[in-house]
Image: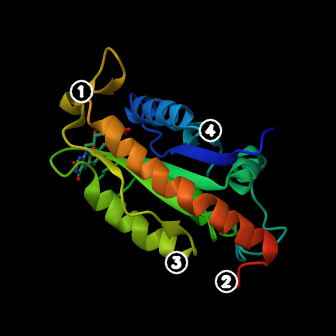
Amino acid sequence: MTDNSRLAVVVGSVREGRFGPVVAAWVAEQARAFGGFDVDVIDLADFDIPLALPAGSPKEPGYPRPEGMTDLTARLEAADAFVLVTPEYNHSYPASLKAAIDWHFTQWAAKPVAFASYGGAAGGRHAVLHLENVLTELHAVTVRDGLAFVNYPLAFDLDEGRPADASATTYAKTLLAQLAWWTPVLRTARERAPYPG
Ligand SMILES: Cc1cc2nc3c(=O)[nH]c(=O)nc-3n(C[C@H](O)[C@H](O)[C@H](O)COP(=O)(O)O)c2cc1C
């Protein structure tokens, strides 16, 4: 383990034949090239994330999560920052991502979150607007500049697994610079005192 910040890149879609892992792999590559982050790609398809929540609050210690979620919870907990990779489903983000968010609370609090979205004409922007609202409720700090891939089959060079427009790399650097600014600030603050939320 290094002194690097731990960045979790979360693949939000679990659909058969999904495109999400392609976007997440490229985002992770950009983050590694940017430097200063230990990058963990978290694929929600790898975990048991039921829709039915238990009684009680995910804020409480001992909240009863399924065994198949243990590793997910530990990796969200360990993360200092997030990039949520989301498609747009019916002008919002997928239920898989909402379920993963709702099973947790303190794992998001006082941490910076950025977004990489993809979809049709809006590039997943509707999904991101909803996510910004939800993450604010969880005391996360959303960064303004994100990545949005409009008409993603055209926006991506599918053979190469990277955006067709080379300027996406510049946008990724802006997103990562904002995350890199917030991450140590919030990590130090969390270590100094528990977040009052
Ligand atoms: C249930 C469903 C609803 C969708 N709704 C939208 C939408 O509202 N806007 C949009 O731009 N694309 C929409 N799409 C297209 C998705 O953005 C596109 O299929 C994308 O590849 C989905 O991400 P995934 O492959 O990682 O699951 C929808 C796709 C699905 C499966």
The residue singled out by tag 1 in the image is: 164
Residue 107 at x, y percent in the picture: 68, 63
Number of residues whose C-alpha sits closer than 10 Å to that of mark 3, classed few (under 14), some (14–19) or many (20 or more):
some
Measured Cα–Cα span from mark 3 to mark 2: 10 Å
Left of 80 or right of it: where is 143? Answer: left
Q: Depth check: 172 or 194 in front?
A: 172
* Local secondary structure at mark 3: helix
Q: Is residue 21 positioned above or below 53 on the image?
A: above
The residue singled out by tag 4 in the image is: 39
- Label whose residue precedes the other's in the sequence (2 or 1): 1
- Label whose residue precedes the other's in the sequence (3 or 1): 3
Left of 153 or right of it: where is 182? Answer: right
Number of residues whose C-alpha sits closer than 10 Å to that of mark 4, classed few (under 14), some (14–19) or many (20 or more):
many
Residue at image point 78% right, 39% down: 2
Q: What type is the residue that disc 4 sits on?
A: Val
Q: What type is the residue that disc 1 sits on?
A: Ala
Residue at image point 30% right, 20% down: 158
- Ligand 1 - quadrant of the structure image: top left
Left of 127 or right of it: where is 182? Answer: right
Q: What type is the residue that disc 2 sits on?
A: Gly
The residue singled out by tag 3 in the image is: 137
Q: Is residue 34 positioned above or below 128 on the image?
A: above
Measured Cα–Cα span from mark 3 to mark 1: 35 Å
Number of residues whose C-alpha sits closer than 10 Å to that of mark 1, classed few (under 14), some (14–19) or many (20 or more):
some
Which numbered dot is residue 197? 2
Residue 25 at x, y percent in the picture: 48, 30
